[in-house]
Image: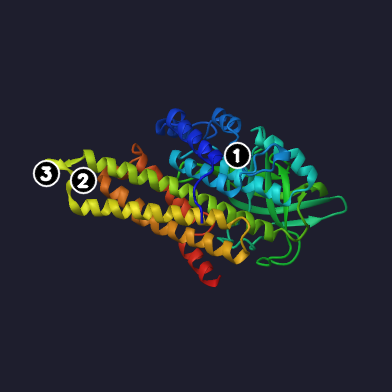
Amino acid sequence: MNLEFTEEQVLLQDTLNRFLQNDYAFEQRQKLSRQGIGYSEQNWQILAEMGLLGILFEEEYGGFNFGATGLMIVMEAIGKGLIVEPYLATVVLAGQLIQKAGSTDQKQTLLPELIEGKLKLAFAYVERQSRYDLSSVALKAEKYATSFSLTGKKSVVFNAETADKIIVTARTSGGDGDKSGISLFLLDKDSPGITMQHYHTVDGLRASELSFDQVEVGLDALVGELDNAFPVIESVIDSASAAICAEGVGVISQLRERTVEYLKIRKQFSQPLGHFQVLQHRAVDMFMAEEQMRSLAYLASIRIEGSARNEQVKAVSAAKVYLGDARSVVGEQAVQLHGGIGVTDELDVAHYYKRLTMLNNLFGDRDFHLQRFSQA
């Protein structure tokens, strides 16, 4: 298997690394995450101008169709820079739902605006009782002659606060836990009957709790087939899982690099910590974990396109399982080797560790994916 990047992919990687080095310092990131909307509209437009919002989408809508490998490169860079802009919510989740399930009119209307940075989306699929079960959908959509009426609640909706539109999973038939009977609806954020409660997440991003009280939408708000949205939801979540494993590679690489650098300059008993053999061994363990994580993340990104469904499941879940392992091997080691300052908000290591913890739990934690892998 050839894992070498193409010339275009290398150019994309270099462009992203320059952006992070020149325009996305940790101090700037912290300032953005704590103020206003939690990110920079100017940075969002820069991402659009760089073509990053169109990585996944077909050329006829203004995209570049770089696929999962291009997304992997972008997400690894997002991990390195701890980027707070709503790329995962808008492009990886909601954008892919439109591409995979949307009608021609929906694609022609929404995707060009998304790619140009003029449209932000959010995906509301988690409910309090659902945990990692994508089929546990209790929010109901009652069908009438010319409309649907949505009633229920959604939890942990990333970037709903600044989204222009929200894609919502709803139960249109069957009972909670049935894979059939789930549908997708595209709503304006300010639709009558929607109330939101916004909050900061532990890793410095934003999420919201949403309540729907007889929110009425037209029949054209349906995205994809009525009662048959589960397969596309499952496909998009797996794609997003592979993407955040690539993001995890970026986070892990920064944790290791910063820790090794600290071991070189921090002195104890009149010599750098890096001179102690036991700490050298721990640094090597971190390096090996990073390389193993990179290999599994790359494999998941390759398998997510064109492979049989069972192969996709195994590759994605294997990467997610190891992401949980790497959180302990790399994340906890980085914090411990920095000593007391490793858990302070002033040090970037603490924030990388928080993001790695969030990535472990997002779309299914280590235990969930270990069971899923064994079943596959």
Q: How many discs mark residues in the rendered view? A: 3
**Which residue position holds label 2?**
274
First in sequence: mark 3 vs mark 2: 3
Give amino acid for label 2.
Answer: Gly
Residue 120, above or below 276: above
Q: Residue furthest right?
A: 145
Give amino acid for label 1.
Answer: Glu
In the image, 96 versus 294, the foreground residue is 294
Residue 161 image label: 1
Give amino acid for label 3.
Answer: Phe
Residue 50 image label: none
**Which residue position holds label 3?**
269
The quadrant of the rendering that contains the C terminus is: bottom right
Residue 226, above or below 166: below
Q: CA distance from mark 1 to mark 2?
A: 45 Å
First in sequence: mark 1 vs mark 2: 1
Q: Where is residue 280 shown, x and y percent of the image?
A: 23, 51
**In what element is the residue under mark 2?**
helix
Q: Which is more foreground, mark 3 or mark 1?
A: 3
| Left or right for 62, reference 221 | left
Q: Where is residue 223 shown, x and y percent of the image?
A: 75, 50
| Left or right for 108, reference 4 | right
